Image (cartoon, rainbow, N blue to C red):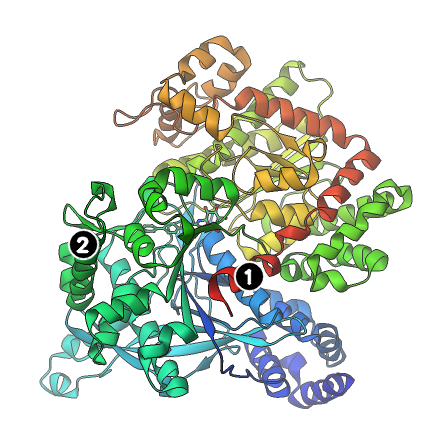
Amino acid sequence: MDDLKSRLTAAAREADLSRMDTADAYNFIVRFVKDSVRTPVQTEGRRAYYLSSEFLMGRLTEANLFNLGIRDSVYEALREAGFDPERLLEIPDAALGNGGLGRLAACFLEAAATHRIPLFGYGLRYRYGLFKQDLAAGYQREEADDWTKYGDPWSDRRESDAVEVTIGGERIRAVPYDMPVYGYEGAVGNLRLWQAEAVRPFDFAAFDAGRYAEASAASERASRLTAVLYPNDNTPEGKQLRLSQQIFLTAATVEDVLRSQERAHESCASLAEYAVLQLNDTHPVLAIPMLITALERRGMPFAEALETARRTFAYTNHTVMTEALEVWDAALLQRLSPEAMGAIGKIQQALEREYPDRTADMNIIDGGRVHMARLATYVSFAVNGVAPLHTEILTRRVLAPWYERTPGKFSNKTNGVTQRRFLAVANPPLASFITERIGDGWVKNFSEVEKLRPYLSDAPSLRDLAAVKRENKQRLCRRIAERCGEKLDADFLFDIQVKRLHEYKRQLLNALSIVYFYQGLRDGSIPDFTPTAFLFGAKSAPGYHRAKGIIRYILEIAKRVNGDPLCEGRMRVIFVPDYNVSWAEVLIPAGDLSEQISMAGTEASGTGNMKFMMNGAPTLGTYDGANLEILRAVGEENNYFFGARAEEIIAEREANAYDPRRLYAEDGALRRAVDTLIDGTFDDGGTGAFRDLYTSLLDGAPWHRADHYRVLGDFRSYVEAKSRAGADYRDTEGYARRALANIAASGEFSADRTVKEYAKEIWRV
Ligand code: 26Q
């Protein structure tokens, strides 16, 4: 590798890298590295394909270099050639995903490559990724994310593998771009992203006849198809263009998979022996009818094609929010893809024959609409949830009739995250702390972190760990000073909630608690408040007005608190703009307290909770999703759990017993905090956004009852748990011990463990 370093130094000097603009330098460096390293080895055996409308890859360069084992030598070579590697921070993230589901897909590809599991990713090459968020106006504004503006040197366009897809009667070319996924001391995986282009990019006949718009119309229609990622996360958006994207992704992918099958194994008759297609939620479920029609076109009878599909597909559900369960208008699908709709009609008939006793809520086609989760569940040989509580909710409620008939299909696969990106790369001081004590086996075998347990009683190690956290907090302070112009004190407790903005995730509960503590500071009723910085990062779906109202409310609180001399040295509120994977990599290592406060039974798993845990932040959380697994792994004494349990909430709902008005009437401090939504304390610019939040808590909308997410119901136990965390934080050694207990117990939350479970129990690769 020193050979690589000296060759790169020489080449970089020769090309005079120090004088290049960042884009040119970036392209130069990546080309050099790609030319110097091994290329993917095609496996001959069985393969798993990961189909997903989202891959939230984040920054590519540092993680790739780290996994190739050349990060430090490349950075040194660049410095020697007069190029500061920090300049690479200008390059945008590859943000081709919204949140948890898209980031999980990225973690899985990296973990599979590391452990030589043949997993091939398929997705869409959006021209613009998830919007950039601007908060300067005091509320969220969206800007286009031109993620390739410095080029996309990691990817290779594969012209010869282009395929054609028909959507609404028009032929469209799907051109694949391959992004290598480098494993750590492992193999190289691949992410294939389809880009839409016109079959005939320009119509000269139309142009010659003076019909200029018509001449490029086909090109414009095609580029619209993969122009942008839909910015919805657990919120519905039933647009025709989104359905077209799904048709495009699935038709092209199925064609590609069948081509490899035919190349390696002659015929498609044995497809199920060599291929398993994992569906990342319902967004790629049209791959089922697409596969069936593709097999029929190759001469296979429908019954056999359906059987093949039933041995080939596996489905992961990622949400229980009923409004986020995908349903498409059958007439629309018929118009855009009559073949796919035809196959779905025949699958519905097969369902009718197989289950004459079925309940109406099992019908795939129901009231002129196609229910994607039902289609996925009926055809797939495996269906899984992403944390035990989530899987239980699936089998008992959301998919109960299916579980009754085919219980063997169902399993749980608890999510995980890659400790390489989110610990080894994002948190160098902690990585050294761990490696100095237990060696570096944890980078590839994360269960080894349990070897840290003996250090729980080692005072010098606890001091070192506190110093590591402090260093990360100082790094975050510098970043926040640069990006937000706000000064922060690294001695404060850093209490962090970073995730998409959604009512069920209850950022509003956090905000109201801050108002409560602020009011208590002002009137002197909370004399012993631990100095705390409350940090937020969150994007709202652009059309989700109530979520935008919550952002605006938090920004108003921040303005008031940070401008109040009384809060000097005691409280800060920071909302970082444009939260993304790169922000996560700076924020999470600096967290003292991990806010995971969704209403129990709503967050399928959560994965940020795991990232904070392995970086040594205790959880302030509800009994929800994978929080429950964190609790089981480290114990109540190392975390701050609060609030109603899913079971209680269900019972309360059935008894119609939740009464936010009573809580509001009986708890004066709660009422005082909630009233800031309507008493003019804060300014919503005359939009009525804050009054809407107030109404949502106390009255609800006419179409559903008040406080759907029990913000007021959990308020008291939340501020109590949060106060306990603050009090405990004053004992530096005791708090460091909790941090270390969390790190040492986080072994099972590696994506390595998760992909190995999928590989063994579902993919059989
Ligand atoms: C549905 C219909 C129409 C348009 C969009 C959608 C849509 C889009 C995105 C529905 C859901 C999503 C994203 C869901 C998601 O990110 N779920 C998260 O998945 C994580 C990985 O399993 C879990 O950890 C989170 O708990 C879960 O919220």
* Whole-percent x, y for residue 180 in the image: 53, 76
Q: Is residue 531 above or below residue 351?
A: above
Instruction: Report the front residue among 32 and 618.
Output: 618
Residue 316 lies in quadrant: bottom left
* Whole-percent x, y for residue 657 in the image: 39, 16
Element assignment for label 1: helix
Instruction: Determine crowd level at label 2: few under 14, some 14-19, many 20+ residues with C-alpha closer than 10 A.
Output: few
User: Is 372 on the left-hand or right-hand side of 104?
Assistant: left
Q: Mark 2 = which residue?
A: 353
* Whole-percent x, y for residue 501 in the image: 46, 42
Any part of residue 91 in sight:
no
Q: Is the residue marked 2 within 8 Å of ligand 1, measured from its CB?
A: no
Residue 548: assigned label: none
Q: Is the N terminus in the top left, top right, bottom left or bottom right quadrant? A: bottom right
Say which amino acid is labelled 2: Arg
Of labels 1 and 2, the one closer to you: 2
- Labels 1 and 2: the sequence-earlier one: 2
Q: Mark 1 = which residue?
A: 755
Instruction: Determine crowd level at label 1: few under 14, some 14-19, many 20+ residues with C-alpha closer than 10 A.
Output: many
What residue do we see at 38% from left, 23% from top?
Answer: 653
* Whole-percent x, y for residue 738 in the image: 75, 38
User: Is 647 on the left-hand or right-hand side of 731?
Assistant: left
Say which amino acid is labelled 1: Val
In the rendered image, the residue lying farthest to the left is 209
What residue do we see at 15% from left, 66% from top?
Answer: 338
Instruction: Report the front residue among 83 and 106.
Output: 106
Residue 378 lies in quadrant: bottom left
In the rendered image, the residue lying farthest to the top is 666
User: Is 732 on the left-hand or right-hand side of 759?
Assistant: right
Q: CA distance from mark 1 to mark 2?
A: 36 Å
Element assignment for label 2: helix
